[in-house]
Image: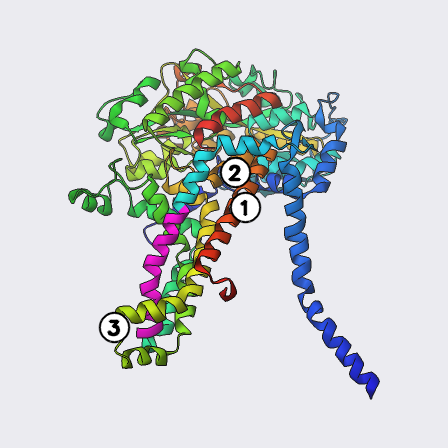
Amino acid sequence: MADIDPRVLARLASRRRFIGGGAAAAAAAILGPSFLAACSSDKSASGPSDAPKAPEDDGSPASGKLRISNWPLYMADGFVAAFQTATGLTVDYKEDFNDNEEWFAKNKEPLSRKQDIGADLVVPSEFMAARLAGLGWLNPISESRWTNRKNMRPDLLGSKVDPGRKFTAPYMSGMVGIAYNRAATGRDLTKVADMWDPAFKGKLSLLSDMRDGLGMFMMSQGGSPEDPTLPDVQKAVDIIKEQKDRGQIRRFTGNDYADDLAAGNIIVAQAYSGDVVQLQKDNPDLKFVIPETGSSTFVDTMVIPYTTQNQKAAEEWINYIYDRANYAKLIAATKYVPVLSDMTAELTKIDPELANNPLINPPKETLAKLKAWAPLTDEQTQEFNKAYAAVTGG
Amino acid sequence: MAGVASSTRQRSRIAPYLMILPALAYLGVFYVVPFYSLFRTSLSTMGGSIYLPKLTFAWQWSNYGHALSEYRDQILRSFGYALAATVLCILLAFPLAYVIAFKAGRYKNLLLGLVILPFFVTFLIRTIAWKTILADNGLVVSALGSIGLLPSEGRLLSTGWAVIGGLTYNWIIFMILPLYVALEKIDPRMLEASRDLYGSNRRMFGKIILPLAMPGVLAGSLLVFIPAVGDFINADYLGSTRTTMIGNVIQKQFLVVKDYPVAAALSFVLMALILVGVLLYTRALGTEDLV
């Protein structure tokens, strides 16, 4: 026991992959006649409904209590207190968002009946936010109260997922790239094909999440997650399958590639930028590269469910976060990639190393190589998941 | 007086039923109902969106055909791994249980305590700890490598051997305890009698100890084999991309692909195969009345 890195424990419930994630959904599917009944009778939830309207805004300042539901370890110390002091609002901040699908399974019933879900603002990943918006379950964020929206990275503002960012306010983003142990590989990696070097046989891991896993390979084959098609996905899957059959790929992982990388079981891994920043502290030989043909990025977004009890306070919170000085504090804590543009000055004020770290403050050329996944239809999600699951083991 | 007697008799007739009522209700709610629901799911077609799926019952037997043909490898592998783990458990647990039962004297309870002690640590952590032990740059691998005993992959972690090892390690307690109980019950006077009759150690083992330990072997085998077949944690953490077990497939079908009918069909296939295996096994050991 003494030899176990405490981070292993943290990672068991890590935010990108939660082993029990969705178990509730599956259990509901098996267990519940009521669940089945609810599904079949629930017409309102099965198609996009009319565009929702935010509650009337009388222009008065926000007051009262704001209930936030966010991922664990996704906040800076003292940040909530500073917000409360600055705005006079009371915040009930909960770290109870563990998994997108799990959250959805838990909250879809009350949301479909427009019942309060105990949170005025939640932070799902972008694909989940797109799903919620499609179901008509999100309130638009008032432009007049979100004056700092101008600070958003232009590439995010123009995203296909939510053109013009009416319903979703990006919170953090991250890059999927290739992490490698320079001392063990003996050379630098620059492109996807470098991962297939026979020298790395059985020492390579890929991500098991469909979007994060496939994006990079689709792009290396001329496809793009921004405009995904089944043939493109299949091409990427076939390449991975070929390498798996050769014994090149050791494991498909969630965040747990980090331990294998640290222990030397893996020397090349498809990895998340935020993880690598943390791992580099212990292992300076660790490098992270976005392949020449580009890679995928993921974004978590703040959204206001249409059952919110305090729309104005939620907007106030979003606007507060979109202030560069405030946001820099969050980045310093989470080590993810900022969703605001031109963060260098504010990050330098906290710690010049943050600003100089290309994994936290990536140069424009790197950002240009990143593509976010388009919102997928149900059929696409199912087809793509199925195609990738056929390789990842089941 | 007669009235009192008959009501007591009546009560005593109802009492056993009352006593099993809670367990029956529990089984009904948490076993029969889900079982039925899972069975219906396994024969359904899926429509609607994958987020709000609509299952329609349609006697869709092709779900089973699909499950069997598509995942035959994983099914065979699961049974192979579980069988290997069960045999290893018997080989490792028998001498240990024997020593604790016959030779430990006043250290019996201490030794039993030590057997149970690791299981206070959660299953997941114990499994992940094996990653440290079997790491590619670790002592075990370099030691085995220097005497040329490494599997063809040139590593231990992320191989089928590691998965079998993990299964053995994680379930062995369920072999040790029933074996110990069975051996403990053996009357030492029988062993004395066998010695008095000039029985050799080997004959004593074959004629007395082993037959009397059979109920323990059988119970232990079932307790190890059944959960091991359906396990997915060991294959997930200690295995590689080529050691996936049927549990991994079911987990992925339920949680990622969300193809509930096929996942349910796979669960039933697994249950049926286990049931057949268990029946054959109990028949072969001929100890139906001893479990």
Name the outermost residue toward the top: A222
Name the outermost residue toward the bottom: B1
Q: Which mark is residue A352?
A: none
Circle 2 crowding by C-alpha within 10 Å: few under 14, some 14–19, many from 20: many
Question: B101 left or right of B138?
Answer: right
Q: Where is residue B11 in the image (x, y as percent from the top left)?
A: 75, 76
Q: Residue B277: in sight, yes or no?
A: yes
**Viewer-proximal residue among A65 and A283:** A283
Q: Position of residue A231 (x, y in %)?
A: 50, 14
Q: Do the residues labelled 2 and 1 touch (CB within 8 Å)?
A: no
Magenta span includes A270 = no
Q: Which residue is drawn at 48% across and 52% down?
A: B280
**Viewer-proximal residue among B79 and A295:** B79
Labels 3, 1: front one: 3
The residue tagged 1 is: B271
Q: What stretch is highlighted in magenta?
A: B82-103
In the figure, residue B53 lies in which quadrant?
top right
Q: Where is residue B218 in the image (x, y as percent from the top left)?
A: 44, 60
Which residue type carries mark 3?
A: Ser
The residue tagged 3 is: B200
For the N terminus of chain B, the image quarter is bottom right
Q: Are marks 3 and 2 in contact (CB under 8 Å)?
A: no
| Secondary structure at numbered mark 1 | helix
Say which chain tag 1 marks.
B
| Secondary structure at numbered mark 2 | helix
**Viewer-proximal residue among A45 and A251:** A251
The residue tagged 2 is: B250
How far is mark 3 from mark 1, CA to CA?
A: 43 Å
Which residue type carries mark 1?
A: Met
